[in-house]
Amino acid sequence: MQIKLALATALLSALWWNSATAQEHHAAEQKHGSGLEADTVQIKSVKELFTKGEVEGHVRNYFMATFNHGSLSDNYANAIGAEIGYKTASLHGFRFGFAGLFTYNLFSSNIWERDFISEKHPKLELELFDIEDPHNKADLDRLDELYLEYNSAKLRAKVGRFSFASPLMNPQDTRMKPYSFQGIKVQLPLQGKGLFTLAWFDHFSPRSTVEWFKAGETIGIFSPGVDEFGNPSACTHHTHTKGVVVTGLQLNPSKQLQAEAWNYWIENVSNNSYGRAIVEVAPQVKAGIEGLYQFQIGDGGNPESTQVYFPDQKQWLAGGILAYEPEDLHLSLNYLHIDGDGRFLFPREWGREQFFATISRGRLEGVGKSDLFVAKARKKWSGNFTSELALAKSWLPAPNDYRYNKYGAMSYWGWVADLNYRPSKPVLDGLSFRLLYIGRTSPDMDIPLKDMYYNTNFHNINFVTQITF
């Protein structure tokens, strides 16, 4: 409560000071004949504040199909839905906005039934809808955003429910619902050379859900996995935390260097520090490094050892990238190593890690003593067509090495093909298509059939049609 009160007080003070400063600055500019304007749209009444606002959103149709190994069940689903958002016009830098979305299960296989062999639900198809209620096919609406924001040359601030982007917490709006956050965010532009971010979040609405949850209630909704002794993890709804403080510093001191550093302090759970730097070492050639370090805060979420989310461990990872980037082409080699006392842990319900070696369906949260190598190729063929290919090889602990493997993940070869097309005809402006194919295999491992289900030896196909407005 003290943290939230302090942040709220700081925001209100900053808003008041910056608004007063902006008005004084604007008056001085008018006096000296400057062409700068306080607001893009001139508002003469409360009515115009709304009539001159902006409507934005999208309509999305998402078809997915997964072909599993042998006699494991294959599944498919087609989701259709839309998100509609509105922002008022700006008045002295202030704007009010909201957005809502809805989804329907147009048709699907029996995704509400468990596979007979693995006794698990179809993971990927179910994530298009409501993972908490597999039978829910139509009641899939959610108030995604509701916020008040302030923007000026010296300060950006937002309070309420809104989208937030960072390496570990992000919207990941590639399904039917993104990850959404409730709290307060303050950003300070650094004279065109970077951006400083300070945020506090205490409620979340994870992707593939329809409800809003307190911070501690979200952890474990996706999959609690097992503890370090192989027992089913009991952290779901048993993690005690008030929320997370996020600080970030993004720097662009020159065209040759980009760097950022982030810290995520999860009250009573863990502290997570991440940083990366990318430098242009030669014309069209870039090299980068990244690293993350974690340690326990408080009792890791619960004083009971059987219900703790983050055990008393010190965990780290390091990665690198070497990229060749001529015009309209990206070729890179990417590597990630995870090490430390246990497993890399960060709530899956708050976003998806964005490391150099990250690929679609390739989340590595929950493992330790691991390595991942990925080769990527991305090409912009024209103004309306792009393609990306990736080939990955992972080395993970054995599925029954519970100290370093929370979700029973297994080493694999994986590949991704991602094609995106936007018609160039003006009459089709806003229409886009995406074809995403993911494959995975583990040829050198003796794996029980039931453990392969949505884990390895599968093919996943996604076709997305979207109209953005």
Image: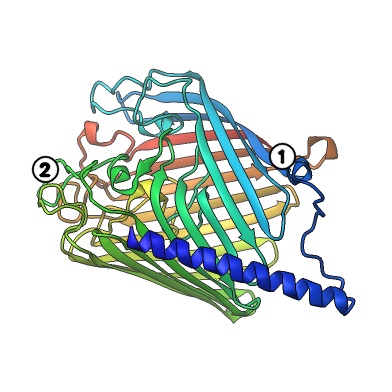
Q: Which of marks 2 and 1 is nearer the N terminus?
A: 2
The secondary element bearing badge 1 is classed as loop
- On the rendered image, what quadrant is the N terminus found in? bottom left
Nearer the observer: mark 2 or 1; the answer is 1
For this rendering, which residue is in front, 144 or 317? 144
Q: Position of residue 41 (x, y in %)?
A: 80, 54
Say above or below: 282 vs 308. Answer: below
Q: Position of residue 287 (x, y in %)?
A: 51, 75
- On the rendered image, what quadrant is the C terminus found in? top right
The residue indicated by pointer 2 is 231
The reply, left or right, for residue 50 in relation to residue 396 is: right
Mark 2 crowdedness (10 Å alpha carbons): few <14, some 14-19, many ≥20: few
Confirm whether residue 198 shows in the render.
no
**Residue most extreme to the right:** 33
Report the coloring of the rendering.
rainbow
Confirm whether residue 190 shows in the render.
yes
Say above or below: 390 vs 247. Answer: above
Badge 2 amino acid: Asn
